[in-house]
Amino acid sequence: MTLRVLFVGAGAVNFGGTIGPWDHSRRLEELGGVQVVAIADPDLPKARGVLQLKLTGGAAEMYKGCLVVADYLEAIQTTKPQVAFIGKFSHPPIGQEGRWHGFLT
Ligand SMILES: NC(=O)c1ccc[n+]([C@@H]2O[C@H](COP(=O)([O-])OP(=O)(O)OC[C@H]3O[C@@H](n4cnc5c(N)ncnc54)[C@H](O)[C@@H]3O)[C@@H](O)[C@H]2O)c1
């Protein structure tokens, strides 16, 4: 079975960064059995950038046909994912106070 995955947020927790070891996409690539059907992020250039990197990497097959959109509701309606990894803040960061686990459902 192949799981259809949506990433909400093209930032560090989903695609790696300098804050911590989190990088959901890389972990899913290691597990396999996953097709990433969409990346939703209002910062479209950033989302397109992470997808482009994935499409030129070793797990490119997992991202083939992946949709990039600003609105996660559009991503859900269009691509019908079975699971979503939510990597966005629940509120605007105020200094570093935005670094909360505020919107992980
Ligand atoms: N970075 C980590 O290692 C880490 C670890 C555990 C939990 N978290 C939590 O994950 C969440 C995201 O953290 P991050 O470090 O990835 O932040 P980040 O700033 O690197 O990325 C957040 C992304 O969310 C996007 N975004 C904003 N509004 C959006 C929306 N409505 N729909 C889709 N995308 C939207 C932003 O454009 C940005 O690209 C936070 O709640 C954080 O506390 C992060």
Image: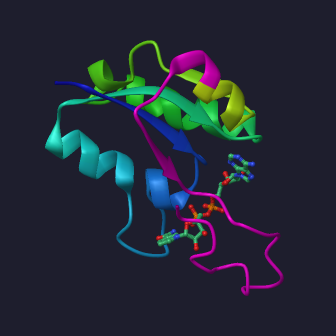
* Residue extending farthest top: 65
Membership of 95 in magenta stretch: yes
Question: In the visual, does 41 lie left or right of 33?
Answer: right
Q: Nearer the viewer, residue 3 or 25?
A: 3
Question: In the visual, does 86 lie left or right of 58?
Answer: right
Number of numbered markers: 0
Residue 105 position, x and y percent, is 52, 61
Question: In the visual, does 104 lie left or right of 28?
Answer: right
Residue plotted at (38% across, 23% down): 63
Q: Nearer the viewer, residue 10 or 34?
A: 34
Highlighted magenta segment, given as a residue range: 77-105
Question: In the visual, does 52 lie left or right of 64?
Answer: right
The quarter of the image that holds ligand 1 is: bottom right
Residue plotted at (30% across, 25% down): 62
Residue plotted at (50% across, 22% down): 80
By secondary structure, the bulk of the magenta-drawn segment is best described as loop
Residue plotted at (18% across, 31% down): 33
Q: Nearer the viewer, residue 51 or 75?
A: 75
Up-down relation of residue 68 to residue 46 (above or below)? above
Q: Quadrant of residue 67?
A: top right
Residue 25 position, x and y percent, is 36, 46
The quadrant the N terminus occupies is top left
Up-down relation of residue 8 to residue 2 (above or below)? below
Residue 12 position, x and y percent, is 52, 60
Membership of 32 in magenta stretch: no
